[in-house]
Image: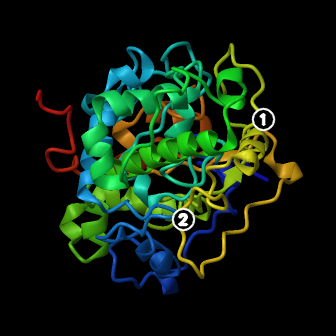
Amino acid sequence: MTARAAVLAGLLGGGALLGACSAPSAAARSCDLPNVAAEHCEEAHELLLPEALPAARGNKYAEDEDAARFGFSLFFDSNLGHGTSCATCHSPELAFVDRVSVSVGKGTGTRNSPTTFNAARLSVFFWDGRADSLWSQPLFPVENPLEMDSTRLGLAHLVESNYREQYELVFGALPEMTEWPAVGKPGDASFDNLPERTRTDVNIIFANIGKAFEAYMRKNATSRAPLDAFLEGDSGQLLEPAQAGFGVFLANGCVSCHRGPMLTDESFHDVGFPSLPEAIADAGRADGLAVLLGDPFNLAGSFADRDLDEEPPTLPSPGPADTGAFRTPSLRNLTVTFPYGHDGALKTLGDVLQTHAADLSQNDRDNLLAFFQTLNGSYPSPPWNDWPSPQ
């Protein structure tokens, strides 16, 4: 495969190899979109972002306003992580990222923090896909020693002492916790030695906290971007360089991986994306899938909300291509969610293009950068866009 056939392969941290480039013929240049060839017209229109969010999966509380307010309070509460909150790595001032290569909570991690913008439009989470819902995703950092280093028992007691009213308004009465240990999670004797019914009660609270987080993060979606207005007929939303960049994006097959409304196939690929010099080998999807399959909070598990006649989903099966593969990132809000790659090895979009589009002309790369600027939506509306006001 030529280098040009791999232009922008895995842009921003994972993506399948692109198909070979082919220049559109003169007879195939009729499209309702300026500077978009007819053979790319349909796939261009498939990038349009719907106004409505997709339905949440496994969470019947996802549209509950009280659940969203509860999740909003929890997101910014540093008591969850003994001085570390979700906002430590997902800061509202920084487009809900931290703008460092690998995030730092209780320790230094190994991966870059994706933005929470539009997370409700995705179906797989983390670079390795170890969570298959937006409510199960935040449960991992809560107990990760390098992130918040808390436990589900500790969090249950925090909710009882600080958030009882908010929790019970949505999820019903909390169980009696007087005899529960102060801290503990699976693998700790304090949790593992509890009666099964008590462990289940703890896990229900833990899952419900995740569902409140999702209810909030569904509010943390940006508006449509200039690209969307362009796709609906307002050609003035994309100036000539951005239109030309869109043409470069389409002609070079970037939509083979960065397709659909979120500009991602949500699949996992190993394209040899560069890592930080000090990084150790990362198995990516192979490790993430093993975690997903063993997670009681996955969508096939008993803590996911389903209709009585609804069958649990079939979970993916491991395969040899999983090792070293990472999730194709969304390109929405790309220019404000740097650095790039699964461990933030590339600091700027210029670095990305220098690495993955070296065979393109400088003019084409400049036009691509102009196109990327048209993928940014507006921040969510108050009060969901910022730190909570003091009570």
- Residue 380 horizontal side relative to residue 158, left or right: left
- Residue 245 horizontal side relative to residue 168, left or right: right
Q: Could one spot residue 12 in this view of the protein?
A: no
Q: Residue at x 24, y 77 (%)?
A: 233
State the scheme by which the image is colored: rainbow
Residue of label 1: 283
Distance from Cα at disc 1 to Cα at disc 2: 32 Å
Q: Which image quadrant: the C terminus?
A: top left
The quadrant in which residue 183 appears is top right
User: 10 Å neighbourhood of mark 2: few (<14), some, or many (≥20)?
Assistant: many
Pinpoint residue 47: horizontal percent, then vertical percent.
Answer: 43, 68
Residue of label 2: 251
Q: Amino acid at mark 1?
A: Ala
Pinpoint residue 206: horizontal percent, then vertical percent.
Answer: 50, 41
- Residue 78 horizontal side relative to residue 196, left or right: left
Pinpoint residue 214: horizontal percent, then vertical percent.
Answer: 40, 50
Q: Nearer the viewer, residue 300 or 267?
A: 300
Q: Nearer the viewer, residue 172 or 220?
A: 172
Q: Say which element carries label 2.
A: helix
Above or below, comparing residue 187 to residue 7 in the picture: above
User: 10 Å neighbourhood of mark 1: few (<14), some, or many (≥20)?
Assistant: some
Q: How many marks?
A: 2
